[in-house]
Amino acid sequence: MFKLIRDKHSILTLDPKPDKEVIIEHYKNIYYQKESGLYKKEYTEKDLNGFRNKAKVFLTLYEKYCGSKPSNVFEPGFGEGFTLNYFNDNQIECFGVDLSQEGLLQHNSKLISNDNIKQGSFEDGIYFDKKFDLIILDHILEHVYDIDKTMENLIEYVKNDSLVIVLVPNEFNLIQNIYLEKNNLKMEDAPWIQEVEHIRYFQKETLDNLFSNYNFQRSSKLMSDFPIDMNILFDDTDYYKNPSMGKNAYNIKLEFETMLINKSVNKYIDLCESFADNDIGRNLIAVYQLN
């Protein structure tokens, strides 16, 4: 059994944490070898457009706060490589490191021949003697074993005008807390707790705490994306109680985001800021720079 405790950054964290070797084995040899969660060996065009939309938002955020395209981008934990592929198609030099290259081989194998793509653990080593214009931390901070070593390594790649764009799950948000109360559940019994895959659970304040403790300041307003978890407020659409409802909920999310992003990426970002203001939205997004 585990508890959720606050670490020194006030981030909700599993205690005890799973063994580091178990985590590495899971991502290196299991996660991308089977279909689970949102990972698939084959994606629909709607899925692929969703990946492009997210990368487009990242690029737009960089342009919004820097006034131009980055010359390079570094993504630790690149997964299947869809974001790096988007930036590569926009003639931006791409760098990445991940425990596994299996997802990349499945979906964006053209990037494998790039010497700037490394296999390894971001928290365990320095892979490039280089500073980057843009660093993307997309669903990595909730997974890493040692958050402080991860942040120390991040600083090695950051210059004064670098942007760090962060995306983490928005845990125990307004909707989720209503769900816990409605179902008489303790935090540790929340169905979104994943004992191996998610070690820590961020809220708006704790994400800012972490970066502030490493001398970063937030350049953007906090944002959060589509509140897909509104589906769990109703028994008929609760994908935790009825997992078959998850695909439909996810497709609605993709359609909603595509509709708005096609109209205006910047107006979509404005909406994401409003979601965060109201403590809804499944994932938090923020832009940080060194103080």
Image (tube, rainbow, N blue to C red):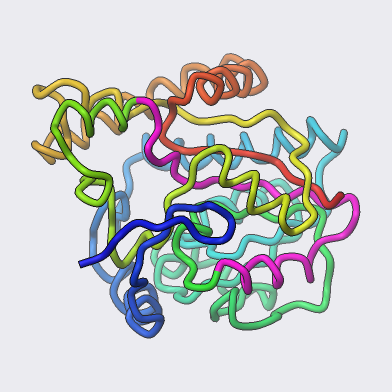
- What span is in magenta? 147-174
Q: Position of residue 6 (x, y in %)?
A: 46, 56
Q: Is residue 199 magenta?
A: no
Q: Is residue 163 magenta?
A: yes
Q: Is residue 133 above or below residue 115?
A: above
Which sits in the foreground, 38 or 110?
Answer: 38
| Identity of the residue drawn at 47% across and 25% down | 279
Q: Position of residue 102 (x, y in %)?
A: 40, 72
| Identity of the residue drawn at 83% across and 72% down | 130
Q: Position of residue 117 (x, y in %)?
A: 62, 73
Which sits in the foreground, 14 or 131?
Answer: 14
Relative side of 264 to 29, left or right: right
Q: Position of residue 16 (x, y in %)?
A: 34, 72
Q: Quadrant of residue 288?
A: top right
| Identity of the residue drawn at 45% across and 75% down | 100
Relative side of 53 to 58, left or right: left
Q: Quadrant of residue 281?
A: top left
Q: Is residue 233 above or below residue 83?
A: above
Which sits in the foreground, 239 or 210?
Answer: 210
| Identity of the residue drawn at 79% across and 71% down | 156
